[in-house]
Image (tube, rainbow, N blue to C red):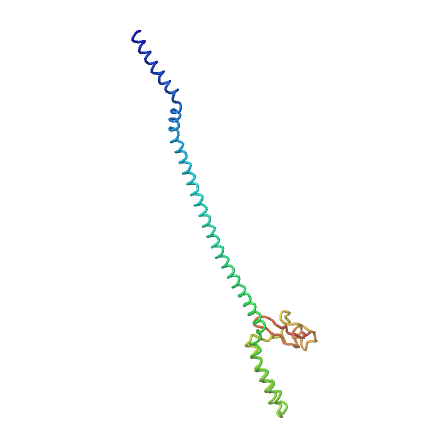
Amino acid sequence: MSRRNRHHHSNNKGNNMENNNMEQNPEQTQETEKETQEPTETAKSAETDTEKTSQAETADKSTEENSQDSNDLQKKYDELNDRYLRLMAEFDNYRKRTLKEKMDLTKYAEEDVLKGILPVVDNMERAIKSLETAKDLTAVSEGIDLIYKKFQSFLESRGIKEIEALNKELDTDLHEAVTKFAAPSEDLKGKIIDVIEKGYYLHDKVIRYAKVVVGE
């Protein structure tokens, strides 16, 4: 046999031995492949566990934040609701107090005016009582005239002023013509020749029209 053929025969023999060894030890080959695969599967499992842990932590954190937000909102709601209830109570008290003050103002609005009239009433009572024993009617007349002037002064202090009418042109904003009579002179035709009831201002407002007689 030549050297080349011997070398080829030797290589084939080596390969055949390796193939025989693999056929004789299939379990050992599978174990080797399994050992190679196990680290990869372990790494994948570790990555999966890490992802699950991270997701769980994220979920817990989100739940905690939502709970905190909910507590903050509830606290803010309670604060606003308490403020609203206080304002409503204060407004109700204000409304009641204002209503009472308004009723008192309406009820006692004339108090100051009536207190000013009382002295006039006292003087009138004294004048009436003096008439029972008075012998000098002139003195009684002067006393009554004094009471009247005092009362007029009080009315003027309260803004009451008489509307001028006699011998004036008829003004329907101030006067109310009750009837007409023949004028005593030509210059009084169309003018007021008599005043049946005096009219009055309260400051600049007419509170009673003067009832008058107009000449024609």
Does residue 36 sit above or below 216 in this rendering? above
Q: Nearer the viewer, residue 104 or 177?
A: 104
Q: Nearer the viewer, residue 30 or 150?
A: 30
Does residue 148 sit above or below 66 in this rendering? below
Residue 120 locus on image (x, y percent): 58, 82
Q: Quadrant of residue 144?
A: bottom right
Work out which residue is located at the far front of the displayed protein and give it: 24
Residue 178 locus on image (x, y percent): 69, 73
Q: Quadrant of the C terminus?
A: bottom right
Does residue 82 sit above or below 106 in this rendering? above
Work out which residue is located at the far left of the displayed protein and give it: 3
Q: Quadrant of the N terminus?
A: top left
Answer with left or right where residue 202 lies relative to residue 73.
right
Answer with left or right where residue 133 lies relative to residue 97.
right
Residue 187 locus on image (x, y percent): 65, 75
Q: Quadrant of residue 35?
A: top left
Work out which residue is located at the far top of the displayed protein and give it: 1
Count of labels in the image: 0
Q: Quadrant of residue 155?
A: bottom right
Residue 37 locus on image (x, y percent): 39, 29
Residue at 41% in and 35% down: 45
Q: Nearer the viewer, residue 184 or 49?
A: 49
Q: Nearer the viewer, residue 117 or 151?
A: 117
